[in-house]
Image (tube, rainbow, N blue to C red):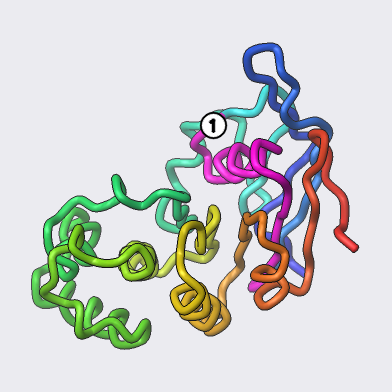
Amino acid sequence: MSCWVNLRDIAYANDKVQLLKNINLDLGHKEKIAIIGSNGSGKSTLLKIIAGLVAPTSGYVEIFHDKMNTLKAFKKYRNAIAYLPQDVTNHFLSPTVIEDVIFSLRARGETQEEALQKADKILKALHIEHLKQRIVFDLSGGEQKIVALAGLLILQPKILLLDEPTNALDEESQQKIVEILNAIDKSMIIVSHHKSFIEQLAPTIYRLHNGEISRAT
């Protein structure tokens, strides 16, 4: 299997606390893996390191077998790696759903017509075309998560990094997220503290505990 993300001896210390140590992990082409662990175990930090948002104290990340020696090195893969934060309320850059979903395409120079055509396909695929003209901040938490995901998917990333995608959502919204993610055929790392949710998505589950990672049983 061709690995698209490799973590090698990743460690991270913050305020004299060793949050991560000796993390080695591989993500293959169109593979879905999950990382579970208690709150504060370092799951979100690890995901940010993979996304190129936080630098590890030691060790390194490889993206498509390209060693990332600095955070700047991740720049060429910004469209290939999509990171969905745990809290998406500060994620939105435009007032309406359709404007926000096409924002990144318009920012890189695509015409309004091209961007709208792509957005229509994404919204339909995620079953949220009825939200097209809604104000983003009037949506439910579950709807906001799906809209934020649409804004990432429109860039056709190869890797999805999802931080607690069902956090604070009701059971119905959680199930919608599960259905959507199961239908997405991309490499994916999902971070969560809900094993029951993760088991519906990822055949391979790792546990982060005391800064170290191991296969969950």
Q: Is residue 19 magenta?
A: no
The residue closer to the viewer here, 48 or 133, is: 133
Q: Is residue 190 above or below residue 57?
A: below
Q: Quadrant of residue 11?
A: top right
Residue span colored magenta = 29-54
Q: Is residue 11 above or below residue 26?
A: above
Residue 136 location in percent, x, y? 19, 62
Which three-letter amino acid code belongs to the residue tagged 1?
A: Val
Q: Tell which residue pokes out farthest to the top in this image.
A: 16
Q: Which residue is mark 1?
A: 54
SS assignment at label 1: loop
Q: Is residue 56 above or below residue 148?
A: above
Residue 67, visible in the rendered structure = no
| Residue at position x 78%, y 39% in the image | 8
Q: Tell whether 99 sits left or right of 129.
A: left
Residue 18 location in percent, x, y? 75, 22
The 10 Å Cα crowd at callout 1, few under 14, some 14 to 19, many 20 or more, is some
Q: Is residue 51 magenta?
A: yes
| Residue at position x 51%, y 36% in the image | 73
Placement of the N terminus among the 4 image quadrants: bottom right
The residue closer to the viewer here, 185 or 68, is: 185
